[in-house]
Amino acid sequence: MDIRAVNTLSYEEFVDIFGNVVERCPLIAAAVWSRRPFSTFPDLEASIAEFIDNLPVSGQEGILRCHPDLAGRDLFSGSLTPESRGEQTQAGLASLTPAEESRMRRLNAEYKDRFGFPFVICARMNDRESIVQRLSERLGSDPAEELRRAVEEVKKICHLRLRDI
Ligand SMILES: NC(=O)N[C@H]1NC(=O)NC1=O
């Protein structure tokens, strides 16, 4: 799709196409539609990033809470969005050993307890080993720094999803 075509979309069409570039947050696409025309795809991406950056902390945490756990129950029950399923599968998370799976589950739960939102990382820029490693490392982060880092990961996921479109 080219940017001129994007600029002619109604908001319903725009939300249909871009509603999941940030996982389960169609509100973001609905909001940035009013900033068109976009000169390029990076311009659209920058509008999304700016919208996210201008949210209060509760809004940014809300975005993170819309993300499914990595290698969590949703992956095995089939209730993920197609985008998330593809990303998690590509990173090897659909084929963890039972021991790796239970380690992920334990670390994810510990992370949520500590920060109040799920661990978010751009799965396609990682593999199963680096995901577990980052998760263990980030468990020790300062909460404000961790929120900032998690939001940057949301933007990386968004970047790749926009590129797919
Ligand atoms: N929890 C989490 O990071 N989930 C996301 N990461 C990613 O690459 N796709 C997702 O759904």
Image: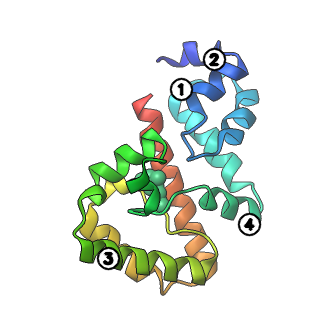
Alpha carbons under labels 2 and 4: distance apart: 30 Å
The label shown at residue 7 is: 2
What residue did someone put label 4 on?
A: 57
Q: Of circles 2 and 3, which is in front?
A: 3
Report the residue at 40% width, 82% height from top.
Answer: 137
Residue 68, percent from left and from top:
51, 58
Q: On the picture, is 34 further left or further right than 159?
A: right
Residue that label 1 marks: 40
Is tag 2's residue or tag 3's residue first in the polypeptide sequence?
A: 2
In the displayed structure, 17 sits above or below 156; it is above
> Real-space Cα distance between discs 1 and 4?
29 Å
Looking at the image, is 2 positioned above or below residue 138? Answer: above
Q: Considering the numbered disc 4 on the image, is that residue within a helix, a strand or a loop?
A: helix
Q: How far across and how far down the image is residue 64, in percent?
A: 60, 60
Position of residue 109 relative to residue 5, above or below, is below
Question: Which one is earlier in the sequence, the residue at label 1 or at label 4?
Answer: 1
Tell me if residue 142 comes above or below residue 54 in the rendering.
below
Amino acid tagged 2: Asn
Give the numbered dot on residue 85. none
Asked which quadrant contains residue 118, the reply is: bottom right
Between discs 4 and 3, the one toward the N terminus: 4
Q: Nearer the viewer, mark 3 or mark 1?
A: 3
Q: CA distance from mark 3 to mark 1?
A: 36 Å
The quadrant of the picture occupied by the C terminus is top left
- Please tell me which residue is depicted at 34% across the width and 79% down the height of the picture: 103
Amino acid type, mark 3: Gln
The answer to which of marks 2 and 4 sits earlier in the sequence is 2
